[in-house]
Image (cartoon, helix red, strand yellow):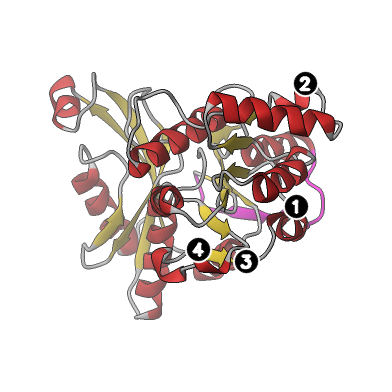
Amino acid sequence: MPVPNPEGTDVLERAATWLAEGHRVALARVIDTWGSSPRPRGSVLAVRSDGNFAGSVSGGCVEGKVVEAAQEVLEGGPPRVLTFGVSNEEAWQVGLACGGTIRVYVEPVQRERFEALLRARRAKRPLVLFTELATGDAQLWTPGDSPLEGARAQAARTALATDDAFSLEAGSLFVQAFNPPLRLVLIGAVHISEALAAYARIAGYDVTVIDPRAAFVRRELFPGVEVIAEWPDEVLERLHLDHRTALITITHDPKIDDPALEVALRSPAFYLGALGSAKTHAGRLARLAAKGFSEGELRRIHGPVGLKIGARTPAEVALSALAEVTLTLRTPGGA
C-alpha cells in the first residue's frame, strides 16, 4: 500500500465511528489488481449493514457488488475473496485505459483486532497485518513485538519499507503495512508554505511549519498544521527527521535556511529542497561546502526546488515542489 493516504485513514476512522454507534461493519480490501487500477492493493471500503459505505476499491467499477457481498458477510457468511473481470467499457467509464482483473477480500470487522490496529495508527506506530484469507484469522505485528521468523519476517520488513500490500504462501496470506503518515517540514511560514501545506495534507502528509520570525507565524493560515515559532535547527534536532520525512526551506534567509539544511543533511530524510534561483542555490551550496559537506551530500538538496512546470504563482510553485517530492518518493531509490 504505497504511502498510507488520507482517504484510507478516514475510512478506518469512519468505520470506528459506526462501530461506536452500534452498527455492524465489514471491511473490503483490494488484494490484487490490474496495472492501471485507480486503487492500489490495500485500498479499503467500509460497509455498514444498512448499505452505507465509505472508501473505494475500484473507483466505481465494482463497488455495488462489493457492498452486496459485505452485507451478506455481515449476515453471518464467511469472509470472501471476490474476483471481478472489468471490461474495457467499464474501465473507460472510470478513466482507465483498459480493463483487467481485481480481487477484493471482504470480512466482518473483528472489534478487538480493529481497535488494536486503530490504537497503533493513532499513536503513529508502524504495524503489519497478516490475514489468512480462507479463515479470516489474522496477526497484528509492530516492530516492538517479538521478532517474526522466516517468510513473515522478510514480508514485514518489505511491507513497511515500501508501504505496500501483497500476498504470500501461494496467495493464501495477505500482508498489509499500516505506516505512520509521511512528514513534510517547511522552513518558513510564507505564501508558498500555505499552499504547500494544504496540498501536502490532502496527499496524506503530517505537516510542520517552522519559522522563528514572530511576525510571520499566523497559525490561522495553516489549519490542521503544527506551526512552531523557534529556530529551525533547534526544532529539527527534536523532530528526529527519518526516512519518511521531506524538508523544504522557503525563507530565502541563509540565517534560517542554512542551519536547517545542515541538520537535515545529517538525517536520512528522503527529500531535501530549497527555494531560490540557480544563483541563490549556488551560493547556498558554497556556504554548506565550507561547513564541510561533501559534493555527494549536497546533491541531495533539490534546488531550485520543484519540477520545471513553468510555475509562476505561489500556488503553482507549491504544486511543483510537492510533485518533485512525490517523484523522489515513488521512483527507485526513493523513500
Start-end of magenta stretch: 134-149
Q: In the image, which is nearer the foreground, mark 4 or mark 1?
A: 4
Q: In the image, which is nearer the foreground, mark 3 or mark 2?
A: 2
| Label 3 Cα crowd, 10 Å radius (few <14 / some 14-19 / many 20+) | few
Give the residue type that dot 1 points to: Pro
Q: CA distance from mark 3 to mark 4?
A: 31 Å
Q: CA distance from mark 4 to mark 2?
A: 33 Å
> Decide: marks 4, 2 in contact (CB < 8 A)?
no
Q: Which mark is residue 216?
A: 4
Depth check, front residue: 215 or 227? 215
Residue 45 lies, in percent from the top left, at 34, 52
Is tag 2's residue or tag 1's residue first in the polypeptide sequence? Answer: 1
Q: In the image, which is nearer the foreground, mark 4 or mark 2?
A: 4
Q: Which mark is residue 283?
A: none
The residue depicted at 59 percent of the width and 68 percent of the height is: 119
Depth check, front residue: 80 or 19? 19
Residue 139 lies, in percent from the top left, at 64, 54
> Decide: marks 4, 1 in contact (CB < 8 A)?
no
- Image-quadrant location for residue 43: top left
Q: Is residue 78 visible?
A: no
Q: Which residue is mark 2?
A: 295
Is tag 1's residue or tag 3's residue first in the polypeptide sequence? Answer: 3
Residue 220 lies, in percent from the top left, at 41, 70
Q: Which residue is mark 1?
A: 143
Q: Which residue is mark 3?
A: 123
Whether 144 is among the magenta residues is yes
Is tag 4's residue or tag 1's residue first in the polypeptide sequence? Answer: 1
Quadrant including the C terminus: top right
| Label 4 Cα crowd, 10 Å radius (few <14 / some 14-19 / many 20+) | some
The residue tagged with tag 3: helix, strand or loop? loop
